Amino acid sequence: MSTDTMIQEKPCYSYGFEPSTANKTGDWRFLTPEKSSRLSPCRQDCLLDGEIPLWMEAVKQEKWEEAWQIVSRYNPFPAITGYVCYHPCTSNCNRGQLDQDIAIEEVEKAIGEWRLNNIKAVQRPIKYKGKIGIVGSGPAGLSCAYYLNAAGYSVTVYEKTSLIGGMLTLGIPEYRLPRYVLNRELYMLEESGIHFIKDCPIGDKKDLCELYEEYDNIFLATGAWKPRRAYIPGEEDRRVYNALDFLSAINSGGQLEISDPVVVIGGGNAAIDSARSALRLKGVNHVSLVYRRSRAEMPANQEEVEAAEREGVELIFNALPREVEKEEQDIIGLMFDYCKTDLNGLSIDRSRSFSKSCGTVVMALGQQADLSVFCEFGRDVPFFAGGDLITGPSTVPEAIKAGRIAAYGIVADLEGLPVPQVMLPEQPVVSFEDLNLATKLNIKMQHKECTPELEASRCLGCGTCNACGTCYIFCPDMAIDVINGRFELNLDYCKGCGICVKECPAQALVLEGGR
Amino acid sequence: MRIDELKIDSEMLYSGHNACPGCGAALAVRYLTKALGPNLAIVLTASCWSIISGMPPLTALKCPILHCPFPSAGSVGSGVKRGLNAAGHDDTTVVVLAGDGGTFDIGLQAMSGAAQRNEDYIFVCYDNEAYMNTGMQTSSATPFGARTATAPYPLFKAGQKKDIMQIMAAHGIPYAATATVAFPDDMESKLKKAQAIKGFRFIHILSPCPPGWGTESSDTIHLSRLAVSTGFFPLYEIENGVTWKMTHYQGEKKTPLKEYLSAQRRFKQMDRQRMEMLQHEVDHEWDCLMEKVATSPSE
Ligand SMILES: Cc1cc2nc3c(=O)[nH]c(=O)nc-3n(C[C@H](O)[C@H](O)[C@H](O)COP(=O)(O)OP(=O)(O)OC[C@H]3O[C@@H](n4cnc5c(N)ncnc54)[C@H](O)[C@@H]3O)c2cc1C
Ligand SMILES: Cc1ncc(C[n+]2csc(CCOP(=O)(O)OP(=O)(O)O)c2C)c(N)n1
Ligand code: SF4
Ligand code: SF4
Ligand code: SF4
Ligand SMILES: [Mg+2]
């Protein structure tokens, strides 16, 4: 007789034979565990509010499609941000206090690339009659277009240049954002039914009022392209480029007249990108970057500065350009004054000037938004605007967020709905000390050969149930069910002991009074 | 951990059992049956688990449970295993499940006999350190300094906890191990190892008991973990009575015992002197254990 038949052969009264599940011990409970989502430091720091712990969990479980669904609620271009975002999300990652921050941007990039390789672009059906016009095809315009198209609206994007993508295409160099990724993203957008009209500067070829007649709502996202000038003699020479013209020409395969050596003026990301791009040009052997303040005061991303230095860009600090030196038709050098920041701002010491020989100058002194598009607009015409145009030069993820928020606003406006809550509500952030890491059980240690799945499995899921299974493992009452890969409390049997709440490493549960 | 790693289909414990909220014994048996099942028969003596397992016709486990008189677990286990063998069911794992009362005290004689005969089953003692089912009376597994129903304030348990592992090692049985609920992986690997061995095997599981110890029901895992990190309940195994091995060694630096004691109301009136005595005792036993591990012959 096997134990199975022992069970089946009733009567056998030394033990029972009906499952004790008939006994609903949930009746005993006077405290009830509940899932509660709390804010993780990564999400708090994410420039587009991404639900990082949630998509980390999906990647860990190798559910790529689900990961893409979650990511795209806040970021339709994870492959792009994976490459170009400066990932402030990693700077306070709680995992860093255990061994090393999660490489969030790498996992994000992997989701984006998975999607580009595995999901076919499909023409989205138009479900609503509202038509939206978008001005500018940078990340802000594209993100707004993506969400409106996905929601079922007819979307047309007007672009001044012959290329779609704004700074993604014209500003950010190829060595930082591979063009097969960018082009595939742009192709997907075109295939999904967004209408692009290139070479059509609004305010010039077509004016805003005309657009307003044609469309039910408008989103302006023309970026910040107006270069700041240096106001120094010789600046108008054709071999004195402004950084955006210089980078645009390189990125779009245009012609540049260059003679060695190249001097780049400025301390921001555009300056670094110009210097690194110049170094890659044929015939250029020496590139220097000159910044008027100290290294510590550089606004550029530190990783980028280090990369430039590694590649051989000479960095010169505390020098302000005074004059472009010419001999006949050629630029022969650039004259600088020593300067530094003190309590009065920037103080210049003319007695300590020097000259640097050069053949080409790139001015990367920052950009501003060109607000002239608005001028022709009547005052009481409602419209949406966002991205660099509104904030001044900022970042790709912030532009994406602006596009998303505008899309929600436009839908609310068209359908007469209340404006949805688009900002993350203020709430306390889950700190490292809040986490219960005593159960090493579920904490994967540093992996040597890292895959996105393994990296994601290191995520502690701060404040969010990331399906680590700890509650399931420690429940004495088998009162945690697994439903569609998620852990759910079964209140029929939970006695409210609170072990799961106490042990949850992510602190994603709370114990509430009563049943 | 990934969901498929949780082996949900191997669970043998049903919801709806009668253990108190946060019961360590319920959890211990959940891990135990999951590791050893499904071809498993359990012999159970009088204890909380007689109640937890459900009033017939209900049962909390997906395997047969044979209830036996309190002192007889060791011999009933022997009979069940031999009977199953005679009927051609050699592949069924037999587990004798007893509380500390049924192991350290009233069951000791029958268990000792079975161990000496090297009967082929696994004796599992879930140790909640008192006769909990009848109202928290002192047993020989109750630690020094604890208050119980038979040693109410201002009394306290005066003697030391009986060293059951040394007793079992002295029987020279093939395998003996300690385990506790905060370390399910450790417990699982010991049970699996035991299952693969023939002869008498003994597993001693420390099982926190919220009402008996006077602890928050949510603290069960936390206390089990503290019991290990303070060195109060080290995790180790003994092969053939002579080879002692640590299975979870957190280094020389042990958590102060006070942290463990002060979370439990049964130690509430313990004064400093008594706490130091117990700390001293724990340190001494720890050193003895380290000595045994260091001087163990390798197999
Ligand atoms: C060199 C450089 C490197 C950068 N690197 C990074 C980086 O690595 N990571 C990061 O996060 N951020 C980076 N940034 C910042 C980032 O690129 C911008 O913040 C972001 O692109 C802003 O998006 P946007 O959509 O608001 O504007 P843009 O990307 O500037 O797009 C605006 C678009 O509108 C078009 N347009 C303008 N006027 C009109 C008009 N009248 N009619 C029709 N179309 C018009 C423009 O041609 C352009 O295509 C970088 C910026 C620069 C300059
Ligand atoms: C011969 C005999 N004496 C006394 C009892 C009453 N009794 C039932 S359970 C129990 C306590 C068992 O204690 P322990 O073995 O430590 O298990 P626990 O209840 O603590 O889980 C006692 C004394 C009994 N059933 N049989
Ligand atoms: S561990 Fe995961 S959830 Fe926590 S901060 Fe880092 S990435 Fe975010
Ligand atoms: S561990 Fe189980 S019984 Fe205890 S509160 Fe959580 S779900 Fe309920
Ligand atoms: S008295 Fe203790 S061992 Fe017995 S069922 Fe309750 S918690 Fe478990
Ligand atoms: Mg007991």
Image: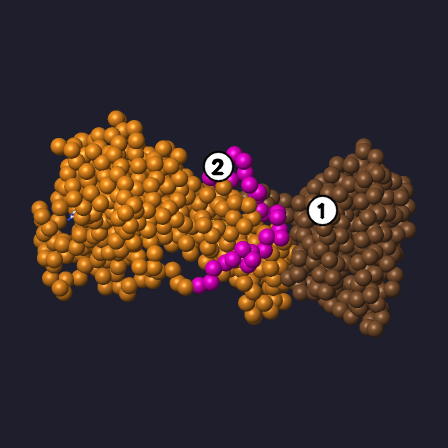
Magenta part, dominant SS: loop
Determine the colour of chain A. Answer: orange
Magenta stretch encompasses residue B66: no
Quadrant in which the N terminus of chain A appears: top right
| Outermost residue toward the front in this view | A351
Q: Position of residue B121 (x, y in %)?
A: 80, 42
What is the magenta range? A427-454
Q: Position of residue A380 (x, y in %)?
A: 14, 65
Residue topped by disc 1: B251
Q: Is residue A480 visible?
A: no
Task: Identify residue type, mark 1.
Answer: Gly
Magenta stretch encompasses residue A428: yes
Q: Same chain for the residues at labels 2 and 1, yes or no?
A: no
Q: Position of residue A272 (x, y in %)?
A: 31, 40
Q: Residue at x 18, y 48 (%)?
A: A231
Q: Position of residue B213 (x, y in %)?
A: 74, 64
Determine the colour of chain B. Answer: brown
Q: Is residue B5 visible?
A: yes
Q: Is residue A134 left or right of residue B285?
A: left
Task: Identify residue type, mark 2.
Answer: Thr
Residue topped by disc 2: A451
Q: Quadrant of residue B143?
A: bottom right
- Colour mapping used in the image: by chain
Q: CA distance from mark 2 to mark 1?
A: 32 Å
Quadrant in which the C terminus of chain A appears: bottom right
